[in-house]
Image (spheres, grey):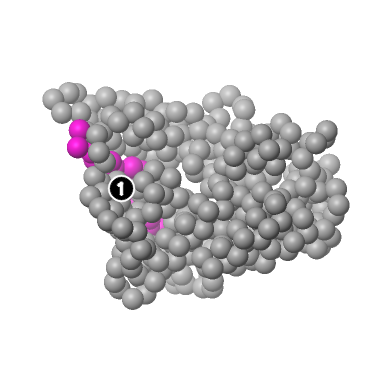
Amino acid sequence: MNRPIHVALIGYGFAGQVFHAPVIQSVPGLRLVTVASSKPEKVKSDWPDLWVGESIEEVITHPELDLVVIATPNQTHFDLAQRALQAGKHVVVDKPFTIHASEARALAMLAAEKGKVLSVYQNRRWDADFLTVLQILQAGALGEVVYFESHFDRYRPEVRDRWREQAGPGSGLWYDLGPHLADQVLLLFGPPVAVYADMALQRDHAQTTDFFHVLLRYTRLRVVLHASALVAGSSPRFVIHGTQGSFIKYGFDTQEEALKRGLRPGTSDFGHDPVEGQLYLPDQAAQSVPNAPGDYSRFYAGVRDAILQKGPNPVPPDQAVRLMEVLEAAIKSAAERREISLGVEE
């Protein structure tokens, strides 16, 4: 290809504005050409040089577009991704990939049939704190990990008027934050033997899940994924215990807040997390561990390289399907109040 990859973004809500448009534009070899949105004035205000599509169909079928990025409400992901693949486009879908695992499997098969790159925007694989955890575990600093706890707690007591907090398919905290936490764990440890989940509506006037506590059971390892909208105090982001030591990290990756402020990947200190985790080894004083630099643009650079056949898909469909199976098992577990087996041998 002797020109940049032409990208269409469908949806310009929070995800499209903050996590996709500015990150796409920061990656050499990608060019954001158009946005399909119900808010054309907002798009034009932020990106005056872009073409605003009058309809989704017009954007999906446009012959000059190579990659379609879907950043619309979760329940629309399957239909839009299917239409884009059938139109011969490469596709990126914001997390969660789909609502049901069966839909995820169908999209994976369609992408293979069409010979197109299909990827899911699991940007938090490139969080500074998670990249640091990955380095620590790959170095074997903790020995065999036997307990891994991942929190994403916030204090948001007021139920806001947005689709993520309204009753309906794909809404709620598990579909919002669960895909991030579970994806990171699957990347580290692979699929668990079984899932046990507790989910609740805890805020006044809550319409959908705003609390989850999920246990992933492995042979020896136990993983806890936890999130709540009613945590005013400070919770650790990661708590990891191994046979030779522990690691504890507070604070969140800084890239989301930086993008909200209008900063972009590549600018000074973008992706820098100043809150260092603590490494605890037997008979030694706690050691501060500087964070690896975070960089969400690495996802889109990976998609670019995959389209050009110069590198692997950064989040391939088989990994996205596996994640949807875990998310779906957790929902079933919470509804039935029992452990759900994933068919993995212990």
| Quarter-of-image position of residue 234 | top left
Residue that carries the numbered disc 1 in the rendered image: 149
Residue 124 seen in this snapshot: yes
Q: Secondary structure at mark 1?
A: strand
Question: On the rendered structure, is 116 left or right of 192?
Answer: right
The reply, left or right, for residue 92 in relation to residue 251 is right
- Judge from the rendering whether residue 242 lies leftward or rightward of residue 250; answer left or right: left
Can you give x and y, in whole percent of width and height, for residue 6 in the image?
79, 43
Q: Residue at x 71, y 31 (%)?
A: 28
Say whether residue 1 is left or right of residue 130: right
- Tell me the quadrant of the picture where the C terminus can be found: bottom left
The x and y percentages for residue 169 are: 54, 71
- Residue 155 visible in the shown view: no
**Type of residue at label 1?**
Glu
The N terminus lies in which quarter of the figure? Answer: top right
**Magenta region: which residues?**
227-244
The residue drawn where x is 57% and y is 42% is: 314
